[in-house]
Amino acid sequence: MKKSFGVKEVVAAGIGTALFVALTQVQIPIAFIPNTSLQPRAALLAFFAAVYGPVVGGIIGLLGHALGDALIYGSVWWSWVFPDALFGIIVGLFAGKFQMKNGGFAGKTVALFNVVQIVANALAWVLLAPVLDIVIYAEPANKVFVQGVSALIGNAVVVAILGTLIGLGFTKIGAKSASLTEED
Amino acid sequence: MSRVLSYVEKDTWIHRLSGVTKLVFFLLWSVTSMITYDTRVLLVMLVFSLWIFKASKTSWKQVGSVFKFIMFFLFLNVLAIYVFSPDQGVKIYGTKHVLAHLAGNYDITKEQIFYELNVVLKYFTVIPAVLMFIVTTDPSEFAASLNKIGVSYYIGYSVAIALRYIPDVQDDYAKIKRAQEARGIEMSKKAKFMDRIKSTAAILFPLIFSSMDRIDVVSNAMQLRGFGKNKSRTWYSAKPLKRNDRLTLAFTVIFCAAALIITFTNGGRFFNPFT
C-alpha cells in the first residue's frame, strides 16, 4: 500500500476527483442523436489512471462519479458508479506499460493504450453496467444494453481522441528521463 | 458553473449530528432503497425522507434547480423504460391487466404503471437523503467520518482534497474557457461537431496541466509536513458521537433490517398487489 499509494497518489486522486466532478457538467452534445453527449471526463479518468495507476484510477472513477452525481444531479446511480471505477482500475493496471511519465508514449504504446481503453470500456459499460442495472434496479434488459452500448461508443471515442491527445501532450513536456538510456 | 449543491451552516438537530452518523444513514438508506421494490416499504421510507428533509430546514433555493434537473432525468428514464419494454411490469408481476391499447406491442397495463411508479418511488426515497447529507455535512468532517467507519485516512484525505478543490477547478475551467473564447474558439451550438471536440481539447489541456502542477505543489507541501508518517491521525473537525447520534444509528440499523426482512419474507423483492 505504502509504495503504490503514497502522498502524491493521495493528492492525485483528490485533485483528479475534483477535475472529474467539475467536468461532469462539460458535455459535447452529438448533434444527430438526441439526448446523448460525449463526456470529456472519461478522457480525464483514462489519463489519470494511465499516469498514476490503478488505485488512483479506481478512486477517481468511484468517488468522482458518486460525488459528481450527488453534487450535481442530487442522486447517485450506483450501477453506473462501479463501471467507472472498474474502467479506472483496468486502465491503471497497465500504467507502467504506457510510459507516459518518462516520455515513451508514442507509436506502440499509444496503440496499446487504445486497445486497453476499448476493452476496459466494453467490460465496464456493456458487461458490468447493464448487469448491475438489472440486478439492482430491475430495469428492462434491452433498455440497459442499448444505454451501455451507446456509453461504450461515446466513451471509447472520447478517450481515443482526447485521452490520446492529452497523453501525447503530457509525455512531451514530461520527457525528462527518456533522454537517458540504461547502461547494460 | 455554480449549479452545485454545497454545505450550508444551520442549527438543526440534523446539522448537529456527527458526520459518521449521517454517512452511515445515507449509505444504509440508499442500499435499502436500492434493494427493495416493496411498495409499502418504499412509501414508509418516502415519508421518513420527507420528514428528515423538512427537519433539516433546507430551503428550496438551495436545492430547487438541482431538483428540477432530477425530475427531468427521472421523466426521461421512466419514458425510456416504457419505450424499450412496455411489458416489464407484466413480466415481473405475472399478470396482465390491459387498460388501453396504444399501437403494436404498446399496451398500457396496470402492472407497467405500478412498476414504473415503484421506480419513481425509489428515486424519491433516495433524493431527500442525498440532498440532506450534502447540505448538512461539513466537507472536512466528511473525511473524518470516512476514516472513522474504517476507510484508510489516505483515502479520507483524497476525499477532503477533492471536496476542497472542486470550486477551484471549476473556477479554473471557467477562466480558461473565457480566455480561449476571447481568442476566438467557438463553444456554442453553432460550432461543428469536430470543432467542438477540438475546442474542448483547447480547454482541457491547460486545465489538466495546471492541475498536475497543483498536484506537485500540494503533495510537496504535505510531504514537508510529514503526511503519512504514522498509521493513524486525528481530525480537527471530527465530532464525537452523542446521545442523538446513537439513537439515530440504532434507528437506522433497525429500520433497514426490518425493511429488508419485510421485503424478502413476502417472497421476492416485489410487492405484488395483483395476485
Image: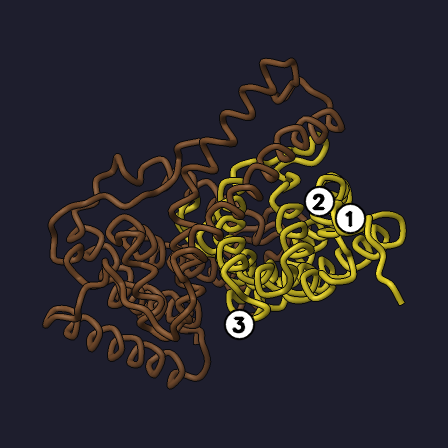
Q: Which mark is residue B148?
A: none
Depth check, front residue: B145 or B47: B145
Q: Residue furthest front?
A: A183
Mark 1 sits on what residue?
Answer: A103
Are discs 3 and 2 located on one and the same chain? yes
Chain that bears disc 1? A
Q: Which mark is residue A174?
A: 2
Q: Which chain is brown?
A: B
Of label 2 and label 1, which has the lower sequence position?
A: 1
Q: Secondary structure at mark 3?
A: loop
Horizontal and vertical percent for residue B211? 54, 41
State the count of labels: 3
Q: Secondary structure at mark 2?
A: loop
Q: Are marks 3 and 1 in contact (CB under 8 Å)?
A: no
Horizontal and vertical percent for residue A74? 39, 48
**Which residue is drawn at the image coordinates 41% and 51% (left, top)?**
B161
Mark 1, Cα crowd under 10 Å, few <14 / some 14-19 / many 20+, is many
**Which residue is drawn at the image coordinates 80% and 53% (left, top)?**
A114
Depth check, front residue: B218 or B268: B218
**Disc 3 to disc 1, C-alpha distance:** 25 Å
Mark 3 sits on what residue?
Answer: A2
**Which residue is drawn at the image coordinates 30% and 57% (left, top)?**
B129
Answer with left or right where residue B242 lies relative to residue B197. left
- Please say if A121 is above or below A173: below
Quadrant where the C terminus of chain A sits is: bottom right
